[in-house]
Image: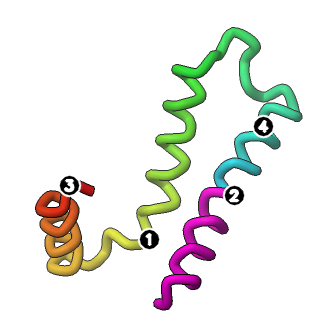
Amino acid sequence: MTRDEKKEFVEELTTAVAHRIMGLIDCSKIPDEWDGIELRWLLEMDFEQAAQFGRRSGSRRRKFLNMVNVNNL
């Protein structure tokens, strides 16, 4: 992927997650008493679900986790 393709991918993924959650808020499916804590948990769950696709490759994931750790990402 080029740098621009990477940026576009990140923007599309984060926008999709944000739009889904904002849609839930607009449809009054998010409880009124929820604040930033519950919304962070919901965001975490949505991003985790969106990321599940890439967890199929064991050695590639290990290399990724090592790179994140080594480079303090």
CA gap, disc 4 to disc 1?
23 Å
The picture quadrant where one finds residue 10 is bottom right
Please tell me whether mark 2 sits on a helix, a strand or a loop: helix
Residue 26 in the figure: left or right of residue 34:
right
Q: Which residue is mark 2?
A: 15
Marking on residue 14: none
Measured from the top left, where is residue 59 in percent x and y? 15, 79
CA gap, disc 2 to disc 3?
25 Å
Q: Which residue is mark 4?
A: 24
Using the image as rendered, state which of residue 18 and residue 50 is in the foreground. 18
Which is closer to the viewer, label 2 or label 3?
Answer: 3
Which is closer to the viewer, label 3 or label 1?
Answer: 3
Label 2: how many Cα within 10 Å (few below 14, some 14–19, many 20+): few
Marking on residue 53: 1
CA gap, disc 2 to disc 4?
14 Å
- The residue at the point 56 percent across, 35 percent down is 42
For badge 2, the amino acid type reads Thr
Q: Overall secondary structure of the magenta stretch?
A: helix
